Amino acid sequence: MKALKYTIFTLLFGGALTSCNFLDKEPYQLTLSDYFNTTDEANSFLTGIYAELGQSTFYGADYMYLVGGDDLSHYGGSGRAPATKGLICNNATTSDAAVTGFWYTLYSGINRANIFLENIDKVSDIDSGLKAQYTAEARFLRAFYYFNLVQCWGDVPFKTESTKDVVGLDIPRTDKQEIYDFIIKEMQEVSDEKTGGLLTAAKLNYKPGRVSKSAAWGILARVYLFRAGEYHRDNRAATDAEKKDYYQAAKDYALKVCTNQGHDLAKDYWDYFIDLCSDRYNSTANESIWEAEFSGNNTTDVKAEGRIGNIIGLAAPDMSSNSDIVGAADPGYSYEFMFATPKLYRLYCIEEPSTERLMSLHVNWNTGDKTEKAEGEACKTIKLKDSRFLWNIAPFVYMEKDGKNTGVTGRKFYELGFRDAVLAHDNNRSYSYGKKDWASGTTEPKEGDYDYNSKFTTNIARACSKYRREYEADKKDKNNTAINFPILRYSDVLLMVAEAENELNGPDAAYDYLNEVRERAGASTIAKGTLSKDEFRQMVKDERGRELCFEYTRHFDLIRWGEFVEDMNELIDYARAGGEWNQGPSNVYTYFQVSSTYNYFPIPDAEMAVNKAITSNNPGW
């Protein structure tokens, strides 16, 4: 599956480069003056620029700790203390290890891209078309890394030349609007339909490990939408460009992805993620546009594994040291750090734009008076129609009949009816353990597939189950996985078109894009003409949550909508109350007590200590 073999390059001041080629056990050293002689060397260096995406400080692991917390997902676990890094638990400092690591990872990627662009002309044997492609990919990745910096930190040091000496490293922060202009110009030029060097997704055989024109256009739409909302965290009035021009550009670039590029939604929502977790691409439709790639299971010298499915995944026992236990008995170990909030659960229970009443919606169909039970039954009908509900929020917990770490023997489903709904929709694509019944007052079987005997498990703040390791090849490693991370999917693009069109012209021409996403999920479509502009805006926000939860877009969506602090704070009292949110009263409620300080990351102490041109940190840090 993997289109790229990652080779990591680390710049040494003075022009020498230490490289750890994953096929070699020992690092070797090369000097730039002796490098970039062949096409293979150019390709190898380019993979080093891509490699930053998979670092443990980025999508490989720590990005979850940085941006995984929002109003729909939180860090947790029974008795688990707050995370000691990242912003996810509202306890970050200016010396935070994950923040520091991400800062330097992005600048490392930028520096590698600068080195590549300064030296690619030295390669004499490279085909002109391939040179244009490689150059375009390097320019795009550099711009993408700058976009991450701007999203997280705002004004940052900006440079388009490589670091060649330890002297002159004091670089002041550049206004983020100037950097936005650079990001957009770079991405526009490399993806131009006539002159841009990026290949189409079709020419890449719809393998999303490399950047295509579609990927660039989709990310450009994301850049424009985030830029359109910058006035919120700047506490100022929106400019004319932010009110209109940026939405128009976002719409235009998103529509390019939708027009004659061969992209479509997988027939079933589950298909995309089963592909992702099975180490394959787009088996039913070309929905995946760009992925951060991982491979391997920690058994060879090739070190390109990640932690997707392991730190954000469904809890299962650690059978990695027992080679005899494979298949259904070993669905893959996960720490299960990430959980849905009751707000996400409830979003699947409604078919209209959410209102302030959402969190008071009675979803437990097994308790309450006649009216409340009827409301719960209606919620049950709606949520079970939406295939995303039973995929994204864990519908079951794995069971071991013979004790801890002896092998999975069954699944206990949280609500009556979940087992049959999952088995019917799954259609033998996943492990199953045979139907069992657990009647009230009898001993729990702990084998087979069975529903909770009290009909409804009160706690609805259940684990994230989007990334499921059961589809990985055996034998599975404890902590390392080959599951890619979805940076950009076609459904995201459709929802960006819907959002931008509504902001520009109202919802009339936007319904089709929203409904395409909803129809694929099995949710009811929204009749045209039934929503106002404000209602449609809220519907898109809700739909992005239902569709893209746990894909690390929500944190930045809330910031660009100017709702991050408000939407987080609104959940504090619900978490304190416990009940349906069993982890809430412990530490979890504090994770939602964020202030406007969290609209930006802190500039790391390590950077300010060496870069004397940065004289102040972001507000509140």
Image: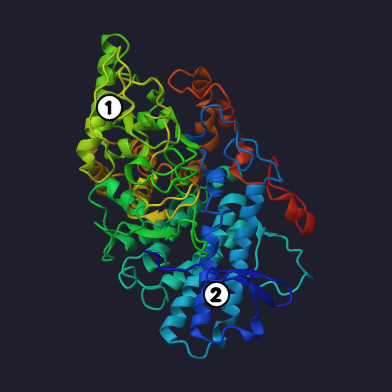
**Residue 447 located left or right of residue 169:** left
Residue at x-position 25% and y-position 21%: 377
Tag 2 or tag 1, which sits nearer the N-term?
2
Where residue 511 sits: x, y (%)? 26, 45
In the image, residue 44 above or below residue 399? below
Dot 1 corresponds to which residue?
450
What residue sits right under mark 2 in the picture?
45
Tag 1: Cα neighbours inside 10 Å, few (<14), some, or many (≥20)?
Answer: many
Q: In which quarter of the image is the C terminus?
A: top right
Name the one closer to the observer, 303 or 148.
Answer: 303
Return the residue nearer the eye: 318 or 490. 318
Q: What element carries label 1?
A: strand
Alpha carbon distance from label 1 to label 2 = 52 Å
Question: Is 71 situated left or right of 156 in this image?
Answer: left
Task: Tell me: residue 21, above or below residue 279.
Answer: below
Color theme of the render: rainbow
**Image x and y of residue 73, in percent:** 47, 36
